[in-house]
């Protein structure tokens, strides 16, 4: 354990400044990820009307890019290759409500490029040893690695929660957790207390979106900010044109202007839609100024959206909403790049989930699960296809290739691991041979044979 002086110096000189610098960049990404992206530049002294149009032109495109990937990633099991049932660590997953918490962890890693989970000793409601696994946003945590590309566990991790005029800080290392406070600028750091843990490593697991050999991990927001800003600018230009110049302007030349405001108002009231304009002066001329067409702005908008779809590997119909005459094969081809992207993210996030579950099993006293390096999380099949098409293909695989039907059940669209387990149970209850085998086993156990 570090002494008080050492931990205060570490936080003041290194951890907190690096956390605050990283948070500034993540706050900008967060604004684009949500719906508070940078304001569209308008001329100095612009009217409130023009500023309102600029606000209406902003759309959270990058949130949709993240959502398209996140909704195709859902862990539904944890098992070894040689076993058909989930391992004992799956109980730890369920006890920590990671069926729902995994979504926030995935979304944060996709949006910011990285997210974290803490794995700490704990107990369940009945007092049994049960590790606590919780996701943490990178806007509230920063981890330091000796080699960020190679190391599984960080040397230190700082978690800072903003309070009234100060930061509540927790620092994790391989031996304990240190609690401190600091002012908003990070200039004054005060030590509170420390607590030991038995993890043997810094109990923080990192989830990376795209980790490269330099230790960098870009998210699904920051690289595409310029493209999203271009779409907003195009929409702003269209809205200005639509608001100020999208209708015909009627003109009159050579006509005497009313001398008073009252006469002008009366002339306006007299003019109806089906009236004819007649002037006594033969030199009077009536004309029309055409409206500015919007087709060019609409095409520019569509081109920008298609560019965003291409560079982010997002199916264009998911951004445009256009799905006219798309066959099943065309839809599968359109989603091919998104499927490949999701598979790559599953490899990265799956490794982190495995790491968290092994450490959690170790802290819970389950040494067998902690040492099982062959066990991995399994992902629910989220591929979009019609159930009739899938069942037909799976049925042919069973008949023509001899694949056991039970092995194909998990591949049916929308079917979860719980559904498959229930089907197997119902099948065994209705199978006379299975009932006979179960009866023989009970009788054998009863007589001690």
Image: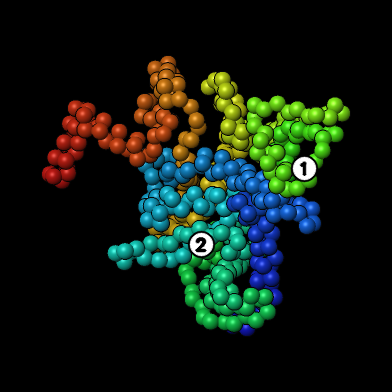
Residue for point 16% across, 36% down: 439
User: Residue 31: x and y, percent?
Assistant: 64, 55
- Extreme-right residue of the structure: 283
Say what secondary structure mark 1 lies in. Answer: loop
Residue, x 42% and y 22% (percent of image)? Answer: 388
Where residue 121 sits, quadrant-wise, is: bottom left
- Residue 225 makes an appearance in the image: no
**Picture layout, residue 81 above or below residue 88:** above
Residue 167 in view (yes/no): yes
Q: Where is residue 321 in the image (x, y as percent from the top left)?
A: 58, 32
Sequence-wise first label, 1 or 2 = 2
Q: Which residue is drawn at 67% across and 75% down?
A: 185
Neighbourhood count class around disc 1 (C-alpha, 10 Å): few under 14, some 14–19, many 20 upward: few
Left or right, residue 393 beside residue 161? left
Q: For mark 1, what is the residue?
A: 258
Q: What residue does disc 2 label? A: 118
Q: Which of marks 1 and 2 is in front?
A: 1
Q: Observer-nearest residue: 28 or 394?
A: 28
Q: Nearer the viewer, residue 341 or 68?
A: 68
């Amino acid at each position: 354990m570090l002494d008080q002086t050492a931990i205060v110096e570490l936080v003041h000189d290194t951890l907190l400044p690096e956390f605050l610098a990283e948070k500034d960049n993540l706050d900008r990404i967060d604004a684009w990820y949500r719906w508070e992206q940078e304001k569209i530049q308008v001329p100095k002294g612009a009217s409130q009307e023009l500023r309102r149009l600029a606000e209406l032109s902003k759309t959270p495109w990058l949130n949709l890019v993240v959502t398209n990937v996140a909704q195709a990633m859902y862990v539904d099991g944890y098992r070894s290759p040689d076993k058909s049932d989930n391992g004992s660590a799956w109980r730890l997953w369920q006890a920590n409500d990671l069926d729902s918490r995994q979504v926030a962890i995935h979304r944060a890693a996709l949006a910011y490029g990285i997210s974290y989970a803490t794995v700490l000793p704990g107990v369940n409601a009945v007092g049994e040893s049960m590790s606590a696994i919780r996701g943490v946003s990178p806007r509230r945590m920063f981890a330091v690695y000796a080699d960020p590309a190679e190391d599984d566990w960080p040397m230190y991790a700082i978690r800072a929660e903003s309070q009234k005029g100060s930061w509540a800080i927790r620092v994790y290392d391989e031996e304990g957790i240190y609690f401190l406070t600091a002012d908003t600028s990070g200039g004054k750091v005060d030590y509170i207390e420390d607590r030991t843990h038995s993890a043997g490593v810094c109990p923080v697991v990192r989830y990376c979106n795209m980790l490269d050999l330099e230790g960098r991990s870009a998210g699904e927001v920051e690289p595409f900010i310029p493209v999203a800003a271009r779409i907003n600018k195009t929409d702003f230009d269209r809205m200005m044109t639509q608001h100020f110049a999208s209708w015909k302007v009627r003109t009159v030349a050579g006509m005497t202007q009313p001398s008073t405001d009252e006469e002008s108002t009366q002339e306006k009231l007299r003019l109806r839609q089906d009236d004819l304009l007649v002037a006594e002066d033969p030199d009077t001329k009536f004309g029309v100024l055409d409206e500015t067409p919007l087709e060019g702005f609409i095409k520019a908008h569509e081109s920008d959206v298609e560019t965003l779809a291409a560079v982010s590997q997002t199916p264009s119909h998911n951004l445009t909403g256009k799905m006219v005459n798309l066959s099943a094969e065309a839809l599968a081809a359109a989603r091919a790049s998104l499927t490949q992207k999701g598979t790559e993210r599953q490899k990265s996030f799956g490794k982190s989930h495995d790491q968290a579950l092994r450490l959690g099993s170790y802290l819970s006293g389950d040494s067998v699960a902690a040492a099982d390096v062959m066990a991995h999380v399994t992902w629910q099949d989220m591929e979009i296809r019609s159930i009739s098409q899938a069942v037909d293909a799976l049925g042919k695989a069973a008949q023509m290739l001899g694949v056991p039907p039970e092995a194909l059940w998990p591949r049916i669209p929308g079917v979860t691991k719980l559904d498959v387990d229930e089907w197997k149970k119902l099948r065994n209850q209705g199978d006379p041979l299975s009932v006979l085998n179960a009866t023989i086993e009970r009788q054998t156990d009863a007589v001690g044979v």
